[in-house]
Image: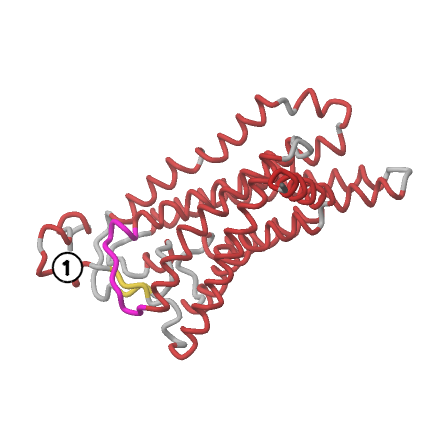
Amino acid sequence: MLPFWAAAPWTNQSRTHELEFVLLGFAHVPSLRPMLAVLFLAIFLLTLLGNTLIALLTSLDPGLRAPMYLFLRQLALVEICFSLDVAPRLLVTLLRPGRGMYPISCALQLFFVLSCVTSESLLLTVMAWDRFLAICRPLHYGTIMSLRLCHLLATTCWLAGVPVSLVFTIWLFNFPYCGSRGIRHYLCDIPPLLSLVCADTRVFEDSIFVITVVFMIVPVSLIVTSYTRILVAVLRMPSASGRHKALSTCASHLVVVILFYCTTGVIHLRPKSSYSPESKQVVSLSYTMVTPMLNPLIYSLRNKEVKAALVRVFIQRRGTFTP
């Protein structure tokens, strides 16, 4: 059995359907597909609206110039890219079941999924470090978190996962695929694709485990360390209002961290685990659809500065266009 590009669909039109992958997301509940399509479309639109609003507010409002909001804008942009990569294909899978996709399309989706997950993991780590410096090192915060360093960290978060994602995507799609081309998932991800490979993938799986530890477990350890030291510093504050403000600032971040790392860790630490494909789909929904939608809600509803910026920008724009 040859790799997918050795007999690409465009070289032999008669074998096109044999070489296409078919996403079988939610095939076990066909009667629910129309309702799920409406639900996921609403989530997709809310995700785009909320994250676009966060990105615009942190760009337009002069009151949101702190490093925290620069990283929040990057997180919103990552979530937009993530949703654009996952949601449209999910909707097509639900509304037009059985429609095939070329291997190159599947590979591109996997590449962007891995890149976005890596970028989000690194951004959440940087945001935890930023909160640690702001609360535990307030006198040195302005000196350490210079604009140049913030831009360097943001750029690193965006680019660090690109070579790794590219290597693992090419590696996975170089394996021979045999038997059914039906992917029991709503997106091209490593676990469902591995189940279609008819070759020894132990080295690949071990490498995935190592990379997952580097980009997931290490960041989680750094985040836990940062917030442990933040908690110690907050408990030492003499002012009750100061403690409440510091904890409130970090609470939203912690909610996002728990949602993201718990679900991605379950999926990628053991790509050939015994969990059923259906249960993996439900877990994957948490970090591919639910978390991107909740991020802007969590950060805006729990952040007075963001809500104030929304009012300022709205009033300013309304006043500009008022005759």
Q: Is 156 on the left-hand or right-hand side of 103?
A: right
Residue bearing the label numbered 1: 16
Within the image, what quadrant is residue 89 found in?
A: bottom left
- Counting from the top left corner in percent of width and height, residue 100 is at 25, 62
Q: Outermost residue toward the right?
A: 238
**Magenta region: which residues?**
96-106
Q: Where is residue 110 in the image (x, y as percent from the top left)?
A: 36, 49
Image quarter of residue 229: top right
Instruction: Give the vertical position of 2 relative to 129 (above or below).
Output: below
Q: Where is residue 111 in the image (x, y as percent from the top left)?
A: 36, 45
Taking 177 as reference, is 119 above or below it? Answer: above
Which residue sits at x=69%, y=20%?
143
Type of amino acid under label 1: Thr
Taking the image as shown, residue 231 lies to the left or right of residue 38, namely right
99 within the magenta span:
yes
Asked whether residue 129 is drawn in magenta, I would say: no
**Drawn side of residue 262 relative to residue 241, left or right:** left
- Residues 224 and 249: in front is 249
